[in-house]
Structures are given as C-alpha cells and as structure tokens.
Image (cartoon, grey):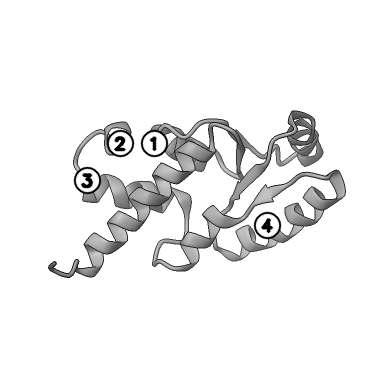
Amino acid sequence: MPRKNPPDFELDKFKNWLNNLRKASQKEIVLVDCKSDKDELESFAVENVILLDKESPYKTLDYIAGSGKKCILLTDLNPRGRKLTQQLEAKFEDKGIKFNPRFRKLLFTTKIRTISALGRYLHREIPTRRKDIF
C-alpha cells in the first residue's frame, strides 16, 4: 500500500475530524467565540453551534447548563483563545457543565491554529461545495 504524502494525510485527518464533529454536534452543543467560526462550522453542516455572548457570557453558560447537553469548546489557539478556554473551563465546572476537549486538541497537532483557517484550508484543498465533502 503506497504511503500518503503529508498534505493528503493532514486532509484526511481534518475530514475525519469534521465527520466526528458533525456526528457529535447532533447531541452536544458546539461553543465558539466569534461569528466567523460559527459561520464556518455551519457551512460544513455542523449543528448546534452557538456563539459565546461576550457581553454576558453567563447567559450563554446558563443556556448550556439548562440544556443538559455536553459542550464542545472550540476556541482558537492564539493567546486570547487559550486564555478564554481556561476561563470557560473553570466556569463550566462551577456550573456543572460537562465539556468535550477532544475536538480542540486536533488543532495542536497541525499547522492550523484557527477555526476560520481550517475552513479556508479545506475550501482550497477541495474545490467542491463544503457540505458535500463528506
């Protein structure tokens, strides 16, 4: 069996990641911190994506806690995103919200550091409509 070259391997990794995220989003809430990330994920048919209300984050957290669903936290890997993740994880514990860090961890293993960059990468690599990729 021929070896895949690194770009193909990375593309396959993201395809699998998005497929798993789409499945998980049917039962869990996906929390993002900017509108462009929300739009990008929804363009890939990820469901239950909500935007963190920056003026009143407790409103968003109360909504998630009241839903009884797990939360997938997807923030960028820049310093602001890392700080926000630490703050939110502490608040999740206070509110009893269970969260799934698995999906954010993939970004640490690639060159891509933001959710919007992920969309641009896939759009460039696969010239079809994004919802039809998978």
The three-letter amino acid code for the residue at tag 2 is Arg
- Kindly indicate the quadrant of the structure image that contains residue 60: top right
Residue 126 numbered tag: 3
Is disc 4 surrounded by few (<14), some (14 to 19) or many (20+) residues within 10 Å? some
Is disc 2 surrounded by few (<14), some (14 to 19) or many (20+) residues within 10 Å? some
Residue drawn 83% across the image and 45% down it: 96
Q: Tag 4's secondary structure?
A: helix
Q: Tag 2's secondary structure?
A: helix
> Would you name the residue on which mark 4 appears?
85
> Would you name the residue on which mark 2 appears?
130
Residue drawn 68% across the image and 41% down it: 70
Is disc 1 surrounded by few (<14), some (14 to 19) or many (20+) residues within 10 Å? some
Q: CA distance from mark 4 to mark 2?
A: 27 Å
Q: Report if the CB atoms under discs 2 and 1 are less than 8 Å apart.
A: yes
Q: CA distance from mark 1 to mark 4?
A: 23 Å
The three-letter amino acid code for the residue at tag 1 is Phe
